[in-house]
């Protein structure tokens, strides 16, 4: 159903190598690999990492076309919510002389990484996909809830 992405594997290794080189970790995070296609989304892999203060960055966005990711407990209470660029949409360069510098293309399938603060009480990962003009809406749109329970050991969930 989903294809492997060598970049994601290398990205994970690079993040872990950078984190292990710094003594005195400040915060714990989850790396969550999510794959998507026309049938929906699924969590493929999770990993716990510790990141030093100087290596964290804020990825929250507040513009239209963003995707909202919520981490919820078993009762549905939101533990964490962030907005990110829609990972289905990519920018590609236009030919020289075009009126605009880039065009936007919506991928039918792919995968992406989420970096989330560790939430031991978490049970669900909710994805709120943005509607993309001119593209079919995924069957699970506008939101999909993915269970984190299958990864309870790796994430040390309560």
Image (cartoon, rainbow, N blue to C red):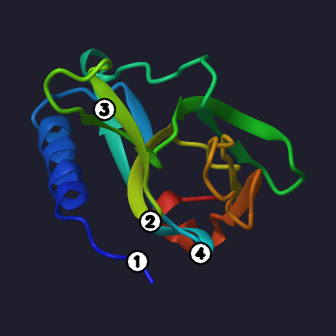
- Kindly indicate whether the residue at mark 2 contacts the one at mark 4 (C-beta within 8 angstroms): no
Mark pair 4, 1: CA separation:
18 Å
Callout 4: SS: helix
Of labels 3 and 2, earlier in sequence is: 3
The Cα–Cα distance between marks 4 and 2, rounded to whole angstroms, is 23 Å
From the viewer's perspective, is residue 83 above or below residue 134?
above
Q: Which residue in the protein does label 2 denote? A: 109
CA–CA distance in space, label 3 to label 2: 30 Å
Could you tell me which secondary element the residue under label 2 belongs to? Answer: loop
Q: Which residue is mark 3?
A: 51
Residue at 18% across, 56% down: 7
In the displayed structure, would residue 132 be above or below residue 96?
A: below
Number of marks in the rendered image:
4
Q: Earlier in the sequence, mark 1 or mark 3?
A: 1
The reply to whether residue 141 is visible in this rendering is: yes
Disc 1 vs disc 3: Cβ atoms closer than 8 Å? no
Q: Position of residue 70 (x, y in %)?
A: 69, 41
- Packing grade of label 1 (10 A; few <14, some 14-19, many >=20) is few
Q: Relative to 16, is 51 on the left or the right?
A: right
x and y percent of residue 143 in the render? Answer: 75, 52
For mark 4, what is the residue? Answer: 150
The residue where tag 1 is placed is 2
Q: Nearer the viewer, mark 4 or mark 1?
A: 1
Could you tell me how far apart the alpha carbons at marks 1 and 2 are, in whole angstroms?
8 Å
Question: Which mark is drawn over residue 145?
Answer: none
Quarter of the image with the C terminus is bottom right
Q: Are marks 1 and 2 in contact (CB under 8 Å)?
A: yes
């Amino acid at each position: 159903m989903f294809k492997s992405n060598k970049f994601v594997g290398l990205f994970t290794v690079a993040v872990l190598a950078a984190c292990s080189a710094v003594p005195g970790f400040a915060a714990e995070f989850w790396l969550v690999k999510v794959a998507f296609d026309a049938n929906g989304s699924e969590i493929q892999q999770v990993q716990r990492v510790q990141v030093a203060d100087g290596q964290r960055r804020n990825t929250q966005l507040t513009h239209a076309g963003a995707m909202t990711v919520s981490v919820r407990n078993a009762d549905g209470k939101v533990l964490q919510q962030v907005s990110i660029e829609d990972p289905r949409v990519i920018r590609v360069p236009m030919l020289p002389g075009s009126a605009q510098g880039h065009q936007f293309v919506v991928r039918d399938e792919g995968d992406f990484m989420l970096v989330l603060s560790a939430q031991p009480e978490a049970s669900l990962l909710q994805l709120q996909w943005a509607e993309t003009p001119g593209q079919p809406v995924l069957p699970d749109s506008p939101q999909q809830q993915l269970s984190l329970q299958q990864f309870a050991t790796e994430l040390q969930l309560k």
